[in-house]
Structure formats: C-alpha cells, structure tokens
Image (spheres, rainbow, N blue to C red):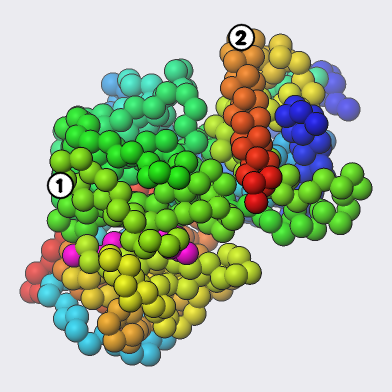
Amino acid sequence: MLGERALEGSEGADRAAAFEALARQSLDSSYRLAALILRDATEAQDAVHDAFVQAWQKWSSLRDADRFDAWFGRILLNVCRDRLRRGRRWQVVDISAALDHRDADEQGRRVDDRLAIERSFRHLSADHRIVIVLRFYLDLSVDEIAERVGVPSGTVKSRLHVALRQVGGDLALAFDEEGDE
Amino acid sequence: MNTQQALKVWLKDESLRWTPPPALLVDVIAIPHARGTSLSRTARVFFVAAAAAALTLAFAAGVIFVGGRSVNPGPTPGPTSIATSPASPSGTVKPASLVPSGQYRPGQVAFVIGDDVFVANADGSDQRRITNSAATGFSFGLFEGPNYPNPSTWFGDRILVLGWRQADDTDSLQLINLAGGTSIELARFTGLLSYLDVAATPDGSMFAVETDESLSFISDHGSVSATVELPDGYDRWGVTDVSSLSWSTDGGLLSVTACTARCQKRGDPGLENTFVVDVRATIPKPIPVSVDRLPGWNAQISPDGQRLAYEVVPEQGWPGSRIWLINRDGSNAHQLDTPAASRIGGWSPDGAHLAFVEDSQTAGLPATVGVIDVDTGSYSTYQLDPEATFEDWSPDGGDLSFVTSTSDNLVRLMTLPNDLQSTTGVLDVGATQFLGASWQWVANDN
C-alpha cells in the first residue's frame, strides 16, 4: 500500500510508478464497480480506461495517496454517469450469463428473478444505479455515498428511495405477471 | 426476500462474473508511459482524449472563441479528408430501378468535442462551435436514443441535439440553428428518465417525442400539438434497444411500438405491437397494424405510409434478425430474402428499396451492408469495415452513407452509390462522437 510518502516530491518516473501501482491495486475493484453500474463489459473497460486517463491527467492534484480510492472512485463514478447519460446505449440483457449462473445457484433462485432485477436495474437512471451499487454492493453508508458522489446526504436518501421504489414496483409487477401465467 | 435483500444478493453474485481482461491491466499501466513510442489501447485513448482537447482549442484558429476567450490555434480538427476508396464490391445483383439522379456528397458534418457541438464543411472548412456549454450549463452530446441507426439530426439549417445539465439533472432537447447558434427547446425532462426516443418528420417541422410513459407531437417552435394515449392493455411506449418511431415522408403517419411492462427490450417475453398514428386526425390514435401481436421490432414505415418493414428475432434469440414486410392493413406479411441475418437500415426515398446491415457482425471482420428491392427481392451487397452502421440515404436515393470507425475509434463516414459497386467517398470526421451529416448537391461538371 502506497502512502503519502510515495507522492511527496515525486517527479517524473517516480510519479508514474506511484500512479501505476495504485492503478494496479484498484483495477479489479474499479472494473467490477463500473461493470455493475454499466452492465456491459466493453462499456466497463472503456469507462475504467477513461477514468484512469482522467486520473493521470489530474494526478498532480492528488497530494495524499491514501485518498486515492475516494478520489479515483469519484472520477470513475462521474465517467460511468456520463457514459450512461450521454451515450444512452441500451444493451440487450445477456440472458446466457444468467442461465449459466442458474446451475451454480445453490439457493435455487430462479433465472426469471434475476432477469427481472436486471431489467429493472437497467431502467434506473445513472444516478439511481450509482446509489444502489454503492449502498448495496459496497455497503457504503448514506453519508459515505454522499461524499463519494459529491451530493448532500438528503439527495442520496431521496435517490435511494426513488430507486428502491422503482425496483420494488418492477419486481412486484414481474412476479405478479408470472403468477398470472 | 425484500427489494433491498434481493438487490444485495444480485449485486454480489453479479460482481463475481465481471473480471477485467488481462489486456486492460497492460493498457492501464501503460498510461504513465504514454508519452513514449509504444501506444497501447489505453495510450491511444489517452492521446485521443488529449487530441480531442487539442482539437477543441484548434477550432479557434483565429475563428472560434470559447467562452468569450480567444484560444490558441492548434492542429486542424474535424473533417480531414475526402478520398475515393478503390475497394472492390462483393455485390451480386444490381438494383434495376434506381438511376442516380445526381451526385450528392456530404455537405456539412456535426460532431461533439468536449461538451459542445461543432459543425464544419466536409472539406474541413468553416468549422464552428454551435453550442455553448460554459454559458448554458448544458453538456451537449451524442443523442443516440434507443435507435438503430441513429435518428437523422439534420433539418435544413437546423440540427437536433440533446443537452444534459448536471446542476439540476435536466435533459433538454434542442433545435440549434446552424447559422446563428440560437436554439429552440423542444422538450425538457428533469430527474428520472429511463427512456427517450425522438423522430422528426422529413421536413423537420414536427417531432415525435417518446418516453416510456408519453408520446407527444411537438412542433419545431416547441409547442405541443398533441399527445397520444397508450392503447388499452399496454404499459409503456417503445422498446429500449431498438427504434420505435418512424415517419412517412409527408409527415402524416407515424409508426410506433407499445409494450406491456415485461416487454422492454427486444426479445422480452412480453406483448408488443406496432401501431400507426394518423397525426392529421383531430385526436390522433394508435391503430394496430395487426390485430394479432406483430412479432417484430424496429418497425419502419415506408415513405408512402402503406407498408412497414420490421425485424423478427429468431426463436433462439438475438442476434440473427431477419427483415419482414407487412402492409399497413396487416396483410401480406412476408420475409425479405436478404443474403444473411440483417437489420433494417432505412427505406430509400422512393420506397422501392431498403438498406440493410448484417446482424451478428463478427468483431474484426468486414460487415456486409446491402440494398434490396423490396418488390423483386434483388439485392446488392458490399463489405465495409467492421461494425458499420447505416447512416442515411441521399435525398434522391442515388447514394447511401454508412458510418464506420478508424483504428483510433474516430468516426469515418463512407458514401456509396445505390448499386453498391464502389465507395465514392471516405470522410474522416476527426471526432469520436458523430451527430450526422447533411447532403450537398454537386453538379456533374464540378
């Protein structure tokens, strides 16, 4: 783990090496986070790329390497948000992945359940996707999410409320329809 | 299990199936050394980003002022070349009835750099920024919507763009005047917006604006002329990953898709149907094309409004779509015999031909594009760069344009005659986000 010392007074190759080390360290988690939000492997790769490019361009503004995760996390979330909002690419659900997963699902959850969640999640706005992933994947508190996203805590609560209401409604509707069939 | 628990379990499970490819790691760690000679993918992205920034500045070149400040000139941005490609065709049958009536070539191109829209002549001249994100707070970007291909955004002297303002989470659909940069706001959406599709009449005087909850007709002055109620038994408009809207040439008829709640994407097991709305009616209503469910997507109404082309997804699921035709009264549904699985590009202006693009394109391999005579079934095909998408027909139907990309992921616009015997132009747009191109008549003696 690189500490503050790694960045102090570092120049040129040292700074590049410090960046490289932190990039390596956060690559896996960053990619997973982006993929969960964007729901697309290629989009996630591009988002992580773009985020690292931005991070490198802003590298001189980071004085404390211990703040890298939060600092880079916000960059990545903004990139994901922009990609969702500006690109507006709608992807087809990868049903095969869900089917593959069924065999390994020891708890016996049905593929339809997973697809229903997937469908509902994909129809959330960028902001709502982000708060859902931060809250229920990273287990961040409302205040931590607020800090990470850069909005007031009340806004986070509101977004969580709206997103959960929408997902809950979608799931109830989907399950009701299944029950009708 | 409640909603929160379900989401938690789903997210944890889903995270396990996302693993960054090894190449990504190699690329990422190349960033700090990107100023060297070896360009990994990420390094190229870095340089593209840097180039984009440079290009933004370059637009000044003594002409453009950004945010009221003059900026330094830089390398020439935007369109850089028009060349003729010697690529050989793979076509088999030349469409018999279309005779090119002129030489249309790309006139102007619009693209996005940073948060603003730029327009330039196809030869690279007269480049100018037509939006001002710094002043308005809106980030203007590529409006893709759910359409395939992208909706045409050019309407004579205006262009359709979508802006997003982070401060108040607002989307704004605007018509920008190319000459003066003034804009008319057609619609504004605040907060949650999970679906948006827009289609304009060919003359650009009327816009169908569709969200999952509403379908409205808005004039080019920004006034709402009508809204259309969802048909009974349907829960939402549109299908999120395909086009839902298309207009007849006279702007009198609109085709649109409505779905049940479970039918949100192509292939969902819900109920969907295609409807035609007579916009000239006192109270426009959606009339189903087929009493039964029309098992297809991406329906596009013919220029005369009498037929619809639509895509049928195979039983095993996407990709592999085939193109079908049906009369507006629901009769004579039949499959077009395209050479391979295909998706609809667009109707020719005279309604005699359909452009199509190979479905299930294989990454890295050339893409088959084609033109088929919808009455005789004869067709021509051509091999274009991978992941080619249909862009537009020229106004006289004599030429078509397709969009591909360069190795640096910059947009390349390729034009071909309607017999697809050769490419007649290759235009490198010089940006990654392409909004569209207008057509310009070039006399034969030029």
Residue B262 position in % (x across, y down): 57, 47
Q: Which residue is mark 1?
A: B280
Residue sitting at x 53%, y 67%: B313
Check residue B296 for magenta coloring. Answer: yes
Q: Which subunit holds the residue at mark 1?
A: B
Q: Which residue is mark 2?
A: A154
Magenta span: B294-304
Horizontal side of residue B131 vs A97, given as left or right: left
CA gap between label 1 and label 2 equals: 47 Å
Residues marked 1 and 2 touching at CB (< 8 Å):
no
Tell which of B162 and B218 is nearer to you.
Answer: B218
The residue sitting at 59% across, 22% down in the picture is A162
Tell me the tag on residue A114. none
For the residue carrying disc 1, how many other residues have a C-alpha within 10 Å: few (<14), some (14-19), or many (20+)? few
- Residue B123 at what x, y percent from top left? 25, 56
Above or below, B250 relative to A179: below
Q: Please, which residue is most extreme toward the bottom here?
A: B92
Task: Look at the image and say whether residue B290 sits in the magenta stretch.
Answer: no
Residue B252 seen in this snapshot = yes
